[in-house]
Image: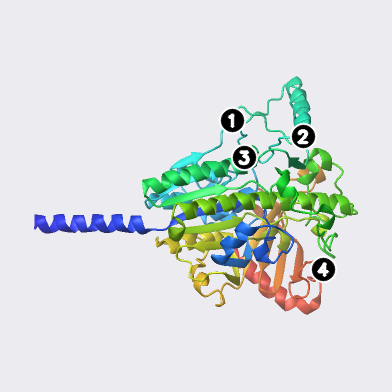
């Protein structure tokens, strides 16, 4: 009997070890403020050969949506598999651990299932790294803890030096946890340095070195390399700016707020205005920027994306050289969209398509459909269960998303009827415009986007304030709110019922 039990124990141990050895690795690539503007999404101007190559190895989701169009709530939702109202994270200032301290995050779940989990760069919100999620968290020495506003050249360095002097004189210490001053200057920079002069290049070098170590260790890994660009400021080495002719950059054809939309629905447009060279940025209801200034900003956004694309190319080349590509699932995603003059705005933080639609590319191991596209409605909250499904791990029952793994082999099949987003307007900007908090809930079907706005106080929904409805077939830019049209009364009733069931 003892011999039989010993044999069974050895068999179980060997089976578990074999399963662990054959489980796919995960390369997780979050990209900050990246809208679906890549070549694989049909843009003929942008230069993104490496992300496009990744798309050819897997599937591109054309209708992927974030749960809230600003980084902290969006990332917290994705990484916990829970929607914002469940998490109670609706702003930039709330650590999800203060609301749900025992939540098991996506990388944490993989860690509990035998994976080495490594976090580099921006995965969770910058100021709330999550030690429970990682076997190891890594940061490049010499860069700020929140390294999106890194400058290398004049006049930005002079601006920062002057601001630092003023802060010291005013006895205001704004150094981060590494003792580095974190100060913003202008919104763009054509850098004279190398790729590693900025954080995204330097962290890619670190990630490449880490991949070599992970290869030697031989355990399945979950490596997240989170890129800061194209988040403001638009800074990149000159060679990426040189890829484009600024005078040919395409500008938005709808530089105006949606007709008949509530006046507060575009009130999240403040981010760019905080940079020294953009203090005069007109608000959405005003006349747009000059064509030249629009093209300068768009040029910077495109250059920043091409810079990140090159770093991703380095990661993919390393996977190939280490012979890891065949056993690695790669998930590339953006945390929210971004407006480049659409609705006369230069930010995220709305419930519109331009802010809630994001890029999502899944490729590599266990992805049957190569070089495919899906028009199914999927959400970032779906990534957690999908990765569990693809890696052969049990899907936790409490997750609020749905695995889209079946779409990777049959992208044309019937799928979700709707995707859901929301935004807490006013919470970021009361001081600037003096409005009270308003929560907007949005439902996106294949044909319509419908939004309901409510009074909001300390997490409690109040009276219904306004409605928005857009026909995506007739008005894909969402320029005309048709909610007041009696023709759509029954459609609004149906969409409103679905929206209430979702939260």
Crowding at dot 3, Cα within 10 Å, few <14 / some 14-19 / many 20+, comes out as some
User: Element under label 3?
Assistant: helix
Q: Which residue is mark 2?
A: 156
Q: Marks 4 and 3, Cα distance to the nearest angstrom?
A: 45 Å
Q: Is residue 379 left or right of residue 489?
A: left
User: Element under label 1?
Assistant: loop
Residue farthest to the left? Answer: 1
User: Element under label 4?
Assistant: loop
* Nearer to the camera, 345 or 332: 332
Q: Is residue 27 left or right of residue 419?
A: left
Q: Nearer the viewer, mark 3 or mark 2?
A: 3
Q: Marks 1 and 3, Cα distance to the nearest angstrom?
A: 22 Å
According to the image, what is the colour scheme of the structure? rainbow
Q: Nearer the viewer, mark 1 or mark 2?
A: 2
* Nearer to the camera, 501 or 272: 272
Which of the two labelled residues, at mark 1 and mark 2, occupies the earlier sequence position?
Answer: 2
């Amino acid at each position: 009997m003892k011999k039989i039990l010993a044999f069974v124990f050895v068999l179980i141990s060997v089976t578990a070890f074999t399963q662990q050895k054959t489980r796919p690795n995960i390369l997780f690539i979050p990209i900050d403020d990246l809208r679906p503007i890549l070549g694989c999404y049909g843009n003929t101007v942008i230069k993104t050969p490496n992300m496009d190559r990744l798309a050819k190895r897997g599937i591109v989701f054309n209708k992927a949506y974030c749960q809230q169009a600003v980084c902290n709530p969006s990332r917290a939702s994705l990484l916990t598999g829970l929607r914002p109202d469940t998490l109670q994270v609706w702003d930039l200032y709330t650590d999800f651990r203060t609301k749900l301290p025992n939540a098991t995050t996506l990388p944490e779940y993989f860690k509990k299932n035998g994976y080495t989990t490594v976090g580099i760069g921006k995965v969770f919100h910058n100021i709330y790294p999550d030690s429970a999620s990682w076997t190891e968290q890594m940061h490049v020495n010499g860069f700020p803890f929140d390294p999106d506003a890194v400058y290398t050249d004049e006049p930005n360095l002079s601006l920062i030096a002057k601001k630092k002097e003023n802060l010291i004189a005013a006895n205001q210490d704004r150094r981060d946890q590494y003792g580095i001053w974190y100060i913003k200057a202008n919104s763009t920079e054509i850098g004279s340095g190398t790729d590693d002069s900025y954080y995204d290049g330097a962290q890619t070098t670190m990630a490449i070195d880490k991949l070599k170590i992970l290869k030697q260790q031989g355990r399945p890994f979950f490596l997240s390399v989170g890129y800061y660009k194209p988040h403001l400021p638009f800074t990149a080495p000159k060679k990426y700016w040189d890829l484009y002719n600024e005078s040919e950059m395409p500008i938005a054809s709808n530089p105006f707020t949606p007709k008949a939309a509530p006046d507060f629905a575009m009130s999240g447009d403040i981010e760019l205005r905080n940079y020294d060279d953009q203090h005069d940025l007109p608000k959405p209801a005003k006349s747009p920027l000059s064509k030249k200034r629009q093209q300068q900003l768009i040029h910077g956004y495109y250059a920043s994306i091409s810079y990140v694309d090159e770093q991703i190319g380095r990661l993919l080349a390393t996977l190939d050289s280490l012979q890891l590509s065949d056993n690695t699932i790669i998930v590339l995603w953006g945390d929210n969209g971004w407006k480049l003059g659409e609705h006369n705005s230069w930010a995220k933080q709305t419930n519109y398509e331009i802010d809630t639609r994001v890029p999502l590319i899944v490729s590599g191991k266990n992805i049957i459909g190569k070089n495919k596209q899906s028009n199914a409605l999927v959400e970032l909250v779906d990534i957690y269960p999908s990765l569990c499904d693809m890696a052969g791990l049990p899907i936790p029952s409490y997750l609020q998303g749905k695995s889209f793994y079946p779409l990777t082999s049959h992208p044309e099949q019937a799928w979700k009827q709707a995707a859901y987003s929301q935004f807490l307007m006013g919470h970021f900007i009361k001081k600037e415009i003096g409005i009270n908090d308003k929560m907007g809930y949005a439902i996106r079907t294949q044909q319509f986007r419908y939004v309901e706005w409510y009074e909001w106080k300390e997490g409690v929904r109040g009276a219904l304030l306004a409605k928005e409805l857009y026909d995506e077939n007739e008005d894909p830019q969402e320029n005309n709110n048709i909610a007041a049209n009696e023709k759509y009364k029954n459609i609004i009733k149906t969409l409103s019922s679905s929206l209430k069931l979702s939260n």
